[in-house]
Amino acid sequence: IDQALVVFTPSGKRGRFPVGTPLLKAAQSLGVDIDSVCGGRGLCGRCQVVVGTGEFAKHGITSRTNHVSDWNKIEERYKSKRGMQDDRRLSCQAVLVKDVVIDVPEASQVHKQVVRKRAEVRDIELDPAIRLHYVVVQEPDMHNPSGDLERLLAALEDQWGLTALEADLRILQNLQQSLRAGNWRITVAVHRGQVITAIWPGFHDRSYGLAVDIGSTTVAAHLCDLASGEVIASSGLMNPQIRFGEDLMSRVSYVMMNPGGDREMTDAVRRAINELADAVCEESGIDREEILNATFVGNPVMHHLLIGIDPTELGGAPFALAANSGITLWASQLDLRFHPNARVYVLPCIAGHVGADTAGVILSETPHLTEKMTLVVDVGTNAEIILGNRDRLLACSSPTGPAFEGAQISCGQRAAPGAIERVRIDPETLEPRFKVIGSELWSDEEGFVEETRKTGITGICGSGIIEVLAEMFLAGILAQDGTIDGTAASRSPRIQPDGRTFSYLVHDGTPEIRIVQNDVRAIQLGKAALYAGIRLLMDRLGVEQIEQIMLAGAFGSHIDTKYAMVLGMIPDCPLENVYSAGNAAGTGARIALLNQNARDDIEEVIRQVEKIETAVEPNFQAHFVEAMGLPHSSASFPNLSK
Ligand code: FES
């Protein structure tokens, strides 16, 4: 038999095969990564390749006789039904006739990279826990009796090389009907190569997953296409548990005071997740039953309440978690209305105060893979802090309080239209200019009044507070110990006596927006707690200099990193190496959704992480007091003066 040479790019793998060999077969025997759901039957279109050099006639194998034919009906049918670019072929249908160079486009690779936009983090390799396999199952034979399930398992082994699969009872209950409805052709969803979790009569190639980040304030969900790895819709809503308590500890107290309170909060958050699933599915026109897999991150209290575990133990020392490894469950066990057999994975928790959200942050920011001494901070009511590199990783949590979110600040508010988010103060005149959320203009620009008429100027959000305090400090209005300097009152009418202290008037309107001495103190306490936690980890590791800093969380993505350093929230570091990591916990959930091995990886990393309990560390208090100063009472910040 004549042989032809085939070279696959970009892998460069090559080999000679008999003329008439389908390209997909050649690729598989060379270990070239090409996707397939239909198993080479010309239905799924996942196996598309581009013909590079070499002539490539339209040839196919006629079904049954296995002869090379001139015209490939199956491929034509696919093309007319679903469309395909002219330079493409279905590799399962195109057969070798001459020497060729074949390019496997990214989209056709099983393990394609899902590109992440930030340079300092890695792309995600697509390898979801759920894979779909179309199979043709042998019909029953009276003379050779065997069960439908056994014949399905045999077909999966034969056509897909899948062995030792388990099937859930619910699969068995639907199997006979599905096989007959699909005329002995069915598609099965296999979870982690082990368990059949769903079946459909005939060919089915839609599979979706949901990555959910349960914050104490908001719950956010991202619907992902498991075939492409893309996020196709995202949605968020307020965590309905807020009505049981603003912060975590008040929710734990609610459980302690109200028997059954944990159940109420569990129901509330599960309802919210179902609502979010509805919202993202509606937006993208898919059915909720097409969600086959979901992943969850959240702090330990959110984690326990989602699963339905009473969080009381997390309310006091020794802050014991019910379980700290990752948990795989059926969605139905959590009352989540996805596909009836959908599976969910909850990321592992690290310690009583450092939860699955931090596991997500590590997965997203990968401090465990870099040589650089990396600090990752997720700032909320509690700050979760991770420090280290690929040799060693430490984690702790520090009670920063809600000031960074605009709470406990006299004119503070959540980030919403009308909130001041950027501030500059002229060091000569001490006059401020600012920007509010919802407007592009600065307050001294023409059109600002017009633009803000709708929203009003309502308060200052977390990032605005950081900026105004840092600018006050730089302009000399704030002393190093955080006192609003009354002697500056002679220089500007904006500095006004306020009892025994002074205040700084940012906006003279209704409402009046000013910074009072207690606001400065609240931020000082929060930032000192944050810095002291970081410093403890630095001591433990014996590190003096940090090479890169990732600021995670909603707050981290809005804050101007320079101002965070001016106030001494974070230690000295070259400013160009301080990054905003956005919602890193949510990204971690997405990574665990799209790459099954990431789940094993993060569990291993978490086992190795050294957990530090700040509350019992003797040095915490001393570090805390030192860190009250602006930017610090003793530490220097050489990178700031650059
Ligand atoms: Fe499904 Fe080729 S493998 S169309």
Image (spheres, rainbow, N blue to C red):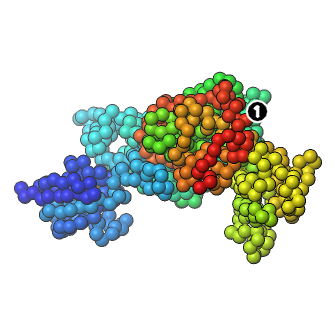
- Residue beneath the point at 54% across and 59% down: 284
Q: Is mark 1 within 8 Å of ligand 1?
A: no
Residue with the most extreme bottom position: 446
- Residue beneath the point at 37% across and 53% down: 112
Dividing the picture into quarters, in which one does residue 190 lie?
Answer: top left
Name the quarter where the C terminus is drawn.
bottom right
- Residue beneath the point at 43% across and 52% down: 123
Q: Position of residue 631 (x, y in %)?
A: 69, 46
Q: Nearer the viewer, residue 154 or 235?
A: 235
Three-letter amino acid code at the position of disc 1: Tyr
Dividing the picture into quarters, in which one does residue 160 lie?
Answer: top left
Q: Is residue 455 above or below residue 566?
A: below
Q: Is residue 458 above or below residue 214?
A: below
Q: Is residue 142 left or right of residue 323?
A: left
Q: Residues within 10 Å of mark 1 (few under 14, many from 20)?
A: some
Q: Position of residue 171 (x, y in %)?
A: 43, 38
Name the quarter where the N terminus is drawn.
bottom left
Q: Position of residue 604 (x, y in %)?
A: 45, 33
